[in-house]
Amino acid sequence: MTESREAAPCDQTLALLRTRRSVPPPLLTGPGPTAEELDGWLTVAARVPDHGKLAPWRFLVIEGEARERIGAIIAATHAADFPDADEKRLAQERQRLTHAPVVVGVVSRAGPHVKIPEWEQLLSAGAVCMNLVVAANAAGYATSWLTEWFAYDRRVLDALGLDPAERIAGFIHIGRPREVPSDRPRPDLSQIVTRL
């Protein structure tokens, strides 16, 4: 005999998935999650399909003063490319990671493998990002999964300690919502579903 699931937890999960939406980082504030909460979410995030048990991803937890330190690196990199950038723009670059109390960088370590295609490894990193987003939202926090230009800039990636073959799958900004923007239009199933 199989165990039956209670309807309420299933309904709560589906309600979360139906209503979850991103909250832009400037609309996020503290208090942030405790270390225990965050460790629990990272554990959940790592429970994704992972062909070959490669764990082709890892986490960078950016909190406290590290947000400002990395923001300074982002601003300096921008200034090197755009020497005429005004102070307002440089301030925006410095604040990229300072709005939310915690930002988790999900690093993709996908690479050549004799059996597991790199594409599957990249998809696994994306699943990690989504699991983290859902876990934080289920705990009452709000999130935003972003990359931005600096996720593709090798100078910033080197400063973050990424190996040359590693890439950022996403920066997950986590905090309390100051406000939740209205929902955006979602895809019409008739336009995206093909039944064979």
Image (spheres, rainbow, N blue to C red):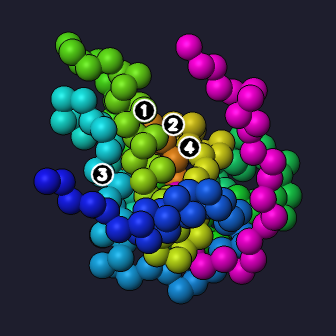
**Disc 2 crowd, CA 10 A, few/some/many (<14, 14-19, 20+):** some
Q: Badge 1 is on which residue? A: 123
Chain part drawn in magenta:
172-196
Q: Answer left or right for 70 relative to 135.
A: right
Residue 154 — which label? 2
The reply to whether residue 8 is in sight is: yes
Q: Residue at x 49, y 65 (%)?
A: 11
Q: Quadrant of residue 109?
A: top left
Quadrant where the C terminus sits is top right
- In the figure, 54 relative to 139: above or below? above
Give SS at disc 4: helix
Q: Residue at x 75, y 62 (%)?
A: 92
Residue farthest to the bottom?
31
**Disc 3 crowd, CA 10 A, few/some/many (<14, 14-19, 20+):** many
**Disc 1 crowd, CA 10 A, few/some/many (<14, 14-19, 20+):** some
Where's residue 189, x and y in %?
A: 70, 34
Q: Residue at x 44, y 37 (%)?
A: 167
Give SS at disc 1: helix
Residue 46 — which label? 3
Q: Answer left or right for 156 relative to 89.
A: left
- Mark 1 and mark 4 lie on one chain; the one further toward the N terminus is 1
Q: Badge 4 is on which residue? A: 151
Name the amino acid type tagged 4: Ala
- Mark 1 and mark 2 lie on one chain; the one further toward the N terminus is 1
Where's residue 44, x and y in %?
A: 32, 59
Name the amino acid type tagged 1: Leu
